[in-house]
Image (spheres, coloured by chain):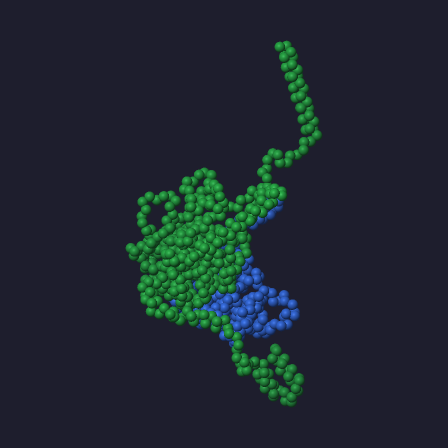
Chain colours: A blue, B green
Amino acid sequence: MDFRSLHFSLDLVAGSGLVLSPEQKATLQTSLVILKRNYKFTRVVFWGKILGIKADYYIAQGIGHDEMSDKKTLYSLNCMEWNLLPPATKTMIDETSVIKGLFLGDPSHDYEHIEMSKDEEGHEAQEEEITVKIKEEQRLAAAISLIDKEAAVVPRGAYIKTPHGHVHTNRSFEGLSVSDAGKLSSYFHFAEPVHLKQKSLLEKADLDPSMDFMDSLENDIPKGSWSLQFEKGSSVLVLRSLLWGGLTFFHIPMTPQHGYIYMGTGLKNIDLPFML
Amino acid sequence: YDHLARVLNKILDERPENVVDMFEELSRDIKRSQFSKKMDTLRDEPESSAAFDLAEIQKVLFGKGGAEGSEGQEEELVETPLPNVMELAFYFEQAGVGLSREETYCIYLALKQLVDSQPLQKCRFWGKILGTQGNYIVAEVEYREGEEEEEEGGEEGIHEAEKDYGKDDVEDKERQEDLDPLPKSNYKPPPVVPKEDNHTGVNKFTYFVCSEPGKPWIKLPQLTPAHIVAAREIKKFFTGHLDTPIVSCPPFPGNEAAYLRAQIARISAGTHISPLGFYHFGEEEGEEEEEAVRDSFEENPDFEGTPVGELVHNSTWVHHVQHILPQGRCVWVNLAQKKEDDFEEGEEEEEKEVEPDEPEPEVGPPLLTPVSEDAEINNTPPWTGRLSSDLIPQYAVAVMKSNLWPGAYAFATGKQFENIYLGWGHKYSAENYSPPAPALLQQEYPSGPEITEVDDPSVEEEQALKAALEEQKAAMEEMEDMEEEEEEDD
């Protein structure tokens, strides 16, 4: 969520039970302004908090010109000193997917993972044990990029894509109506579309290419992995992801206010099909 | 490019002159025509939004309590079971845990409404459990002595219904036996573990839930051990509606209200902790019997408060809720007793002698054990302690966060402490959840030498056996001949 609107936005997502203490809010305000200046970002977003055993990570993202592709992720342990995270590569994501357990809270901690690889040379099959060492920093980067890819939510119409391919915020976005806000189809994953290209031409004709360039939440498998709730009657709409426990998206209908924040353990909820 | 297409369309339709000069104006006209007004001056908005409905309900909360004006106020000033929720919320906020202030205040008012409507001794805001379609706000409540609601009547009714059922079955069986004796199954269902009485063990507190502050508080049913045992084996999201059936494997005996109550009990048993010394046992008992389970404690009036720095460690916190045994109760009950009548189960008889044939009593950690004795899961410590603020440690609050039940927090500062749970209501497990395997197949008949299949003897074996038998026969005849000769001699 945009750090300038952090105050009141946090109140809206507090229904999940995790807030920031006044001390943290105050520190964030000062440090994010400095961050924006130093790195020359167009917009700074407070992404959320990943809870660890010994310490929590506070994550912020800085956005350059293109909203979708030009993002840098930074983490901090005390909301004051920020360190840049390496962008997550596919190999990193694959390696870190085998690590189980909570985050430790120590960015330089090494996870050791023993991989057995068979080398067949001639007639003998030799098994070699390779110990792969993965740093917690990499695990953090991989987790954040996965969460962004699978669970970052924006309402329809909030971002538009120019013919050049750049994604900008839509300055004439006035918010979804109450009835639209109640439908899952009016929310999109803020990531490169995967299913969009597989739609039939008939469906594509109805889409507006400037606004509908992302995958809708409606087609997520398993069905029901999003919990849509209206809080305070219908004043605030809160979307919670059941797949990534702790991701909360809020939107106030008929206003352009929206944002998402992740406050959780950083682990995917693989038991989701059993739990629905 | 839609707008450009529309402008060109209009130009092609109308073909005005001096198009190039008028191009800008045409474009502006088309843009204006696209703009749709939101105000429809003919009709007012007829819909009453859900926000309006909820606000009406919540207005009642804010109104003062009507008829009992002065009397009510006097009573409240003396002693109120209502906790100071705002103060506790402030401390939790320092730790980064809690709900927004407005929501907390609404919950505060809703608790006050609950206290006014029910005769309660103690009331506490237990926490909030999230669900897919709605959430639950949970209040933990202890009734004043003697003022319980009559639920006993309901239970007796159920027992009577079961007895009637049993009679019907017996009659049917008799009829069938007259016709043809059907094989009776030897299957006896495992005996039902009797539930604990109110005010003891698992059912020590009563819980009320509501989905939003202002809506009526609904009481959750008392727990039976079967609920807890089943709840340990399934993992389901709550939907927010208390009467949804829980479809799961193994089947859960009850609907969402019972599952919610079971999870609340497990969370309370696992995560309600207090600083060491805050509570102590009432009287020092002389001899401790092995099976004496202490289940009552009192506030220690001599408690002076532990410094915050020490409260960050595991050893200064203790559990003050009894651990739930694998049986599903807090006090173990021996079920393997010889019963003459099916209805008399071992409710009153707790045999303390353990014979080798009988199951061993299940023992859990006794009350007021320090938290450092909790088991670790997957190399993670079960609790993490931290100070709420690194910058100003003098006024910081010590916070304990549970790693086993994510969402359970406890804070302590000076003489105050509190527990809260805000989360989805599930335990953390490093491994994936996998439903328990189905039970082993039952044996239809005991396997013995009569039924065991044996290969038919081959021809050689039969001939060998025949030869051996003939030899034996010949030997026997010789023996008989010899005996006859001997007899004849005599």
Residue A67 location (% of width, % of height): 52, 70
- Furthest residue in direction top, as rendered: B489
Q: Give above or below for B273 relative to A167.
A: above
Residue B478 location (% of width, % of height): 66, 17
Left or right side of B311 for B10: right
Residue A74 location (% of width, % of height): 46, 65
Q: Quadrant of residue A77?
A: bottom left
The quarter in which the C terminus of chain B is drawn is: top right
Residue B296 can be seen, yes or no: yes
Q: Image point 52% across, 66% down: which residue? A: A228
Q: Quadrant of residue B418?
A: bottom left
Q: Nearer the viewer, residue A24 or B292?
A: B292
Q: Nearer the viewer, residue B347 or B124?
A: B347
Residue A64 location (% of width, % of height): 50, 71
Q: Give above or below for A229 relative to B196.
A: below
Q: Image point 39% across, 63% down: which residue? A: B115
Q: Give above or below for B39 relative to A188.
A: below
Residue B436 can be seen, yes or no: no
Q: Nearer the viewer, residue B410 or B189?
A: B189
Q: Quadrant of residue B416?
A: bottom left
Q: Image point 41% across, 69% down: which residue? A: B61
The quarter in which the N terminus of chain B is drawn is: bottom right
Q: Nearer the viewer, residue A272 or A107?
A: A272
